[in-house]
Image (spheres, rainbow, N blue to C red):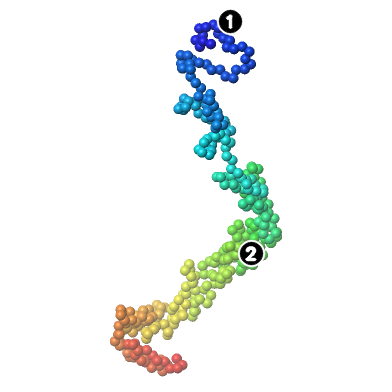
Amino acid sequence: MNKFGLDTGIGGNGTYLLKANIFRSSDISIIHPLKQNINATNPCSKEPCRSQKAVCILSSESATGFSCKCSSELLMTTIENNKQECRPPAVDYCPLKCNLGVCKVINHVPQCVCQPMYEGEHCEHYRCSEYCLNGGVCAPLSIPLNPNSNEPIPLKCTCKPGWSGARCEISILECQKRCHNGGSCIIKSDGMKCSCPAKFNGDKQTVRGSPICDCADGFQGKSCELNMCDNYCKNGGSCVLNHSGPKCDCPRGFEGDHCEFSCSDYCLNGGTCDMHMDNLLCKCPSRFIGNRCQTDICLTMNPPASCAITSSCQELTCKNQGTCHVVNGSAICNCTGSW
């Protein structure tokens, strides 16, 4: 064949008879005498890739003029002595017995992927098993749209009479017993609550399965049944509740957090009591200070000083046959046995 079409060949159609009686030609080489060396050799003719079980491909980018390629189902793999060979790609072995699940290799680690209603390392635990308490019946809340989904299905418990809660863990009778003073029990998703009547407070809730009361200001006790104002104020004082607790509004002539002090016993260290605008005021001896004359100024010095006597029995009148004495600079009364 002439690539320029100058020779008409046999019969004038440009066809040449190369060899007769050939059943099949395996391949045809077309040589371009003017484009390359007519004596060019085929680097793949000696099957250089045979030892690698690969196919030899001519390549102008390779220094050898060829490269070895694996067929699509094989992968060039480095074997012993740093040799390479076409082999099937490695498949991770998954040996786990997964019961109602499938063994899959994830990040080269075999794991069991369970069906939606099963869980556990080997998908051995049925999720509804012992899920509902106190005789409740367990069932899946919904059916997955994708039958091949492995996402867990939410569960629902149908409880027997007298029980409630997500897992039938709350006794309705026990809830009613917990609410006092006519309160009614309400079972919510986060536990038991008490709905209280007017003038009563308290919030019922469940903590670690045990109901407790979160009491309003001024109330305490397991069921908020104790009013902190009860018996809090003495001598006729009235109790007032605020966010910091109970406070006493004392009647005339009484002082103290609980109205426990009267004018007769309010002042200390020889102080004399006087009433001023419903408040008790103490007139203290010269070496004592404080709202009740409770602080000795001689003991507040550093170091403590030995103060001279600054108070005398002339400033103190002892009642009920008591006798006056000066002790550590202060006049005090020494009472008789019955006082």
Name the side, left or right, on which 106 lies relative to 282: right
Write down the residue under mark 1: 11
Q: Nearer the viewer, residue 87 or 113?
A: 87
Identify which residue is drawn at 50% across, 7% down: 6
Query: In the figure, 324 relative to 260: above or below?
Result: below
Q: Nearer the viewer, residue 215 or 106?
A: 106
* Residue 318 placement (x, y as % from top left): 39, 91
* Residue 82 placement (x, y as % from top left): 50, 38
Query: Which picture quadrant has residue 298?
Result: bottom left
Query: Which picture quadrant has residue 212?
Result: bottom right
Residue 252 seen by the camera: no
Question: Marks 1 and 2, how far apart in space?
Answer: 112 Å
The numbered dot on residue 198 is: none
Q: Nearer the viewer, residue 333 or 75?
A: 75
Query: Which picture quadrant has residue 161?
Result: bottom right
Write down the residue under mark 2: 175
Query: In the figure, 295 relative to 220: above or below?
Result: below
Circle 2 sits in a helix, a strand or a loop, which is it?
helix
Q: Residues within 10 Å of mark 1 (few under 14, many from 20)?
A: few
The amino acid at mark 2 is Cys
* Residue 154 placement (x, y as % from top left): 63, 50
The amino acid at mark 1 is Gly
* Residue 190 placement (x, y as % from top left): 59, 58
Q: Residues within 10 Å of mark 2 (few under 14, many from 20)?
A: some
Quadrant of the drawing holding the C terminus: bottom left
Identify which residue is drawn at 59% across, 12% down: 19
Identify which residue is drawn at 66% across, 63% down: 171
Query: In the figure, 131 relative to 322: above or below?
Result: above
